[in-house]
Image (spheres, grey):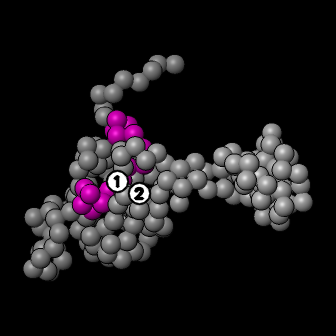
Amino acid sequence: ASTAGIPCGLINGQHTDRVFSFLKSGMTSSQQEAASVASDRSPASVGADEEPHGTLFMPMSQDGSICHTRRWILSLPASAQVSVNDACARQLAGRGSLLPKGISKVHGKFEKNDCVKLMHNGTEIGRGLVNFDSDDLQKIQGKSSNSLKKVLGLDEVPLEACDEGNVVLTVAADAFNPNRETAAH
């Protein structure tokens, strides 16, 4: 939900006072009145000057830097992983597609159009919707796009493992720039 712009909370619901303390920000006086009736507390004390008891997950910014499709991709469960090499990581950072040639390992089972974690050097760098199932992707990993038809024995195949529009980076794009400046400590 937070990727869709909705704030979320993790709270022990057995304690109503904790729920109301969590909701304190943004409560109008009429909302505080309703909360006081439900909790048998005075309206002034409901949500007033309390630290919330729970974990708040702030919504992602709706500034237009990420489209609805990409927000949706980030919200999908991704249990399988696809590891990529350095060149592929840079390609993805430049908003390119995930090509089979850049895939170094496929971890787990998945179907075509499933969401997978994109890994580089053991770190998740993004998420993507794959154009192949895990068995076919293992067969074509490391192969050039023009050899995919022959390897898979099919007449038509997509050239990309993940189309650029179905890849979302979860790290800063400049993390893969070999010329970036790093602070010496």
Q: Is residue 175 magenta?
A: yes
Image-based side of 59 in relation to 165, left or right: right
- Give the residue at mark 1: 67
Residue 175 location in percent, x, y?
38, 37
**Residue at figure coordinates x 47%, y 62% from the top left:** 75
How would you rate the neighbour count of disc 1 (Cα within 10 Å): few for under 14, some for 14-19, many for 20 or more?
few
The quadrant in which residue 87 appears is: top left
Q: Are marks 2 and 1 in contact (CB under 8 Å)?
A: yes
> Which residue is the site of mark 2?
71
Instruction: Give SS at disc 2.
Output: helix
Q: Please, what is the three-letter code of the amino acid marked with disc 1?
A: Cys
Is residue 11 highlighted in magenta? no
| Residue 29 placement (x, y as % from top left) | 74, 48
Which of the two residues, 67 or 96, is positioned nearer the viewer here?
Answer: 67
Q: Which residues are magenta?
A: 162-176
Residue under the point 52% across and 19% down? 185
Dot 2 amino acid type: Arg
The quarter of the picture where residue 147 lies is: bottom left
CA gap, disc 2 and disc 1: 6 Å
The answer to whether 48 is drawn above or below residue 35 in the figure is above
Question: x, y percentage for residue 41?
Answer: 89, 55
